[in-house]
């Protein structure tokens, strides 16, 4: 059985993947991370590494190390963010400013958690083979906010189920989010049989 390194070892390995001159937007440096490691301030280490990774091009391995360290530290939202960023390394990044319709106009009445678990459908201009409007599924991560509710606006990141369908998008394109569609048909059950095994 392969030995899994502990979170602290993983964080040290992640630091080693960064160039020494990498700096977070907050101004914190790789040197600051090494000092925090010396003081065993592990949550701070993870946080600064995530900040540096958000502004500095890093590898899939880097995000994988952070995600596993966060999992071991039971920091669930951080783990999901690191997994998300690793996915972006592999599949690309789609960011947008999303404004939700007001509760009176839209179907949504409550805020949703912005941590990548919601998987709405999006009209990104694609069509089905018979010319109908085709909706595409993408998970949604709200930046800088825990939740997003009706009538609110935030910058979001999208992780499409099929990234290749999204490649045509460019800055300035307007896409729409859908959480439900009109009913396409009604079925009446006429027979139910038990399993035969």
Image (cartoon, grey):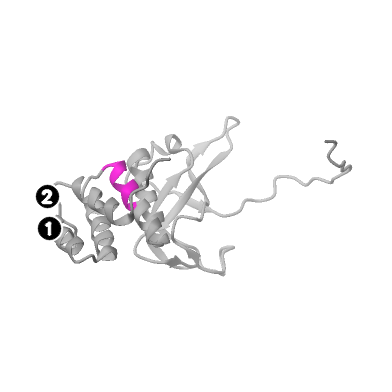
Q: Classify mark 1: residues with Cα within 10 Å, few (<14), some (14-19) or many (20+).
A: some
- Look at 56% across and 64% down and name the residue there: 108
Q: Nearer the viewer, residue 67 or 129?
A: 67
Q: Quadrant of the C terminus?
A: top right
Q: Which residue is mark 1?
A: 31
Quadrant assignment, res 80: bottom left
Q: Is residue 83 above or below residue 24?
A: above
The residue that label 2 is drawn on is: 20
Q: Which residue sits furthest front?
A: 1
Tell me where residue 21 appears, x and y as whole percent: 10, 50
Q: Nearer the viewer, residue 11 or 136?
A: 11
Which residue is depicted at the point 37% across and 45% down?
3
Q: Residues within 10 Å of mark 2 (few under 14, many from 20)?
A: few
**Do the CB atoms of the residues marked 1 and 2 lie less than 8 Å apart?**
yes
- In three-dimensional space, the C-alpha distance between marks 1 and 2, rounded to whole angstroms, equals 7 Å
Can see residue 95? no
- Looking at the picture, tell me which residue is in the foreground, 4 or 197: 4
């Amino acid at each position: 059985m392969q030995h899994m390194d502990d979170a602290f070892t993983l964080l040290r390995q992640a630091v080693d993947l960064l160039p020494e001159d990498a700096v977070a937007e907050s101004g914190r440096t790789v040197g600051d991370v090494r000092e925090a490691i010396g003081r065993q301030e592990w949550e701070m280490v993870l946080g600064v590494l995530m900040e540096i990774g958000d502004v500095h091009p890093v590898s899939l391995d880097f995000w994988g190390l952070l995600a596993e360290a966060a999992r071991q530290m039971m920091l669930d939202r951080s783990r999901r963010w690191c997994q998300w960023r690793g996915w972006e390394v592999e599949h690309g990044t789609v960011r947008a400013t999303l404004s939700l319709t007001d509760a009176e106009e839209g179907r949504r009445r409550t805020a949703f958690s912005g941590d990548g678990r919601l998987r709405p459908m999006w009209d990104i201009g694609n069509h089905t083979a018979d010319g109908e409007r085709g909706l595409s599924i993408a998970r949604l991560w709200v930046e800088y906010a825990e939740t997003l509710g009706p009538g609110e606006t935030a910058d979001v990141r999208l992780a499409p189920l099929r990234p290749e369908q999204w490649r045509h998008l460019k800055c300035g394109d307007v896409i729409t989010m859908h959480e439900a569609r009109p009913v396409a048909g009604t079925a009446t059950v006429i027979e139910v049989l038990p399993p035969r095994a």
